[in-house]
Image (spheres, helix red, strand yellow):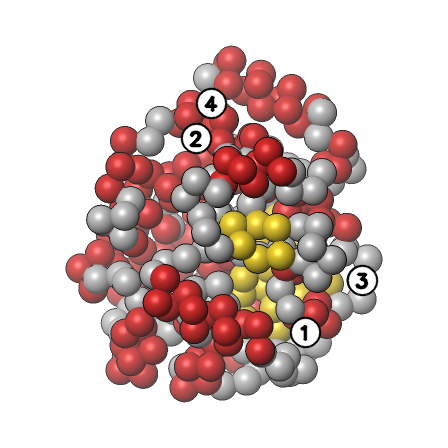
Amino acid sequence: MEEGTSALSESQSSNTEYRVSDDGKVKVPAFITRPEVYKKVKADLDEYKWIDSDYLLATYPKNGTHFAWEVMTMLLQGLADNIKQPKEVLMVDIFPITGSEECFPSPRVLNTHYRTDVLPAEFRKAKTVVVMRNPKDTFVSLYYHEKCLNPLFNPVKHAALASLKLEDFLQKFLYNKDIDYGSYFTYTEYMWSRRAEPNVLVIFYEDLKLNTAATIQKVNEFMGTNRSPELVQQIAESTDFKRMKQAKVETKMIDSVKKVMAGSPVSQENRQKIIQQMYRKGGIGDWRNHLTVAQNEQFDAFLADWEGGKGIPFKY
Ligand code: A3P
């Protein structure tokens, strides 16, 4: 399933920028915080020369980016202390990469929600950890992101999203209408198709949540960080949902971060609210509390027709 033309025409209503694969076949709506910042973000991304000691974390939105980034960064640093600088600084989709060295010298974990075929070829040679999450929990998490987080990120542009209905968003999510970064389903198919490449490790959010230490150990081996079983266990404890959320709430912005974040549209006042909402439930199966029987049947019927998803071992 490529990003279809019908989906594109739906998306064009509010997106004027796309990221396109080298062969022109895949085109996904770009994520734009502010147009003037996006210009620099895009220029930096397109010209970036990959640093071999760095890592890439590639996730569809709400698939556990913060969780996995914390794990990977702790492995790199060899410490189980929660990271004080926000991962957003290394999110190549929203911040210009060139300013990031001040907060995060190499080696570091760059992160993106773009499928890697719409990034410059440089990014496809990166050692890449991909995190996937079951589509129903992704949907619910993304619904709350749209409804509660986006109005905090940009109160003027996204005010109307506060009244977004789950039913309306379900149709958007399943049929890829106006979704930043494009369809969850095409994203997941493509990233899953890369799983046998030696520079790619695919893990699942549910495994990170349920078998945290064992999954961190897989990442440890893949990254070549060689951290001890004791440190792996400590990282598992530090990234436990409640503990990590508390650490993030309590983290004060240090000066170098403030400087880098000066380009961010997010007010300081909203930052705390954003952290509270970003670390929402942190579990598996919350979709059961949200989907009606009819909505769940529609979702299941959609998944039964999703050829590219067959064989992906999701846990619900
Ligand atoms: P929920 O909305 O279901 O709570 P991303 O970082 O890609 O935006 O993903 C956000 C999702 O990951 C949210 O899911 C969030 O609560 C969850 N999450 C963040 N940190 C986590 C952690 N340490 N353990 C478990 N889940 C976490």
Return the residue at label 4: 291
CA–CA distance between discs 4 and 2?
12 Å
Quadrant of the image containing the N terminus: top right
Which amino acid type is shown beneath numbered disc 2? Phe
Cα separation between marks 4 and 1: 40 Å
Q: Can residue 35 be seen in this view?
A: yes
- The residue at the point 64 percent across, 47 percent down is 187
Label annotation for residue 208: none
Image spot of residue 226 (x, y percent): 68, 77
Residue, disc 3: 197
Residue that badge 1 annotates:
122
Q: Which residue corresponds to the image point at 36% horizontal and 58% vertical from the top-left?
A: 33
As measured in the structure, the alpha-carbon distance from the residue carrying label 1 to the one carrying label 2 is 34 Å
Q: Does any atom of ligand 1 lie closer than 8 Å to the CB of label 2? A: no
Which secondary structure lies at badge 1? helix
Mark 4 vs mark 2: give the one in front: 2
Q: Mark 2 points at which residue?
A: 169
Does label 1 or label 2 sit earlier along the sequence?
A: 1
- Specify which label sits upstream in the sequence, 4 or 1: 1
Q: How crowded is mark 3: few (under 14 residues within 10 Å), some or many (20 or more)?
A: few
Amino acid type, residue under disc 1 in the picture: Glu
Q: Which of marks 4 and 3 is nearer the N terminus?
A: 3
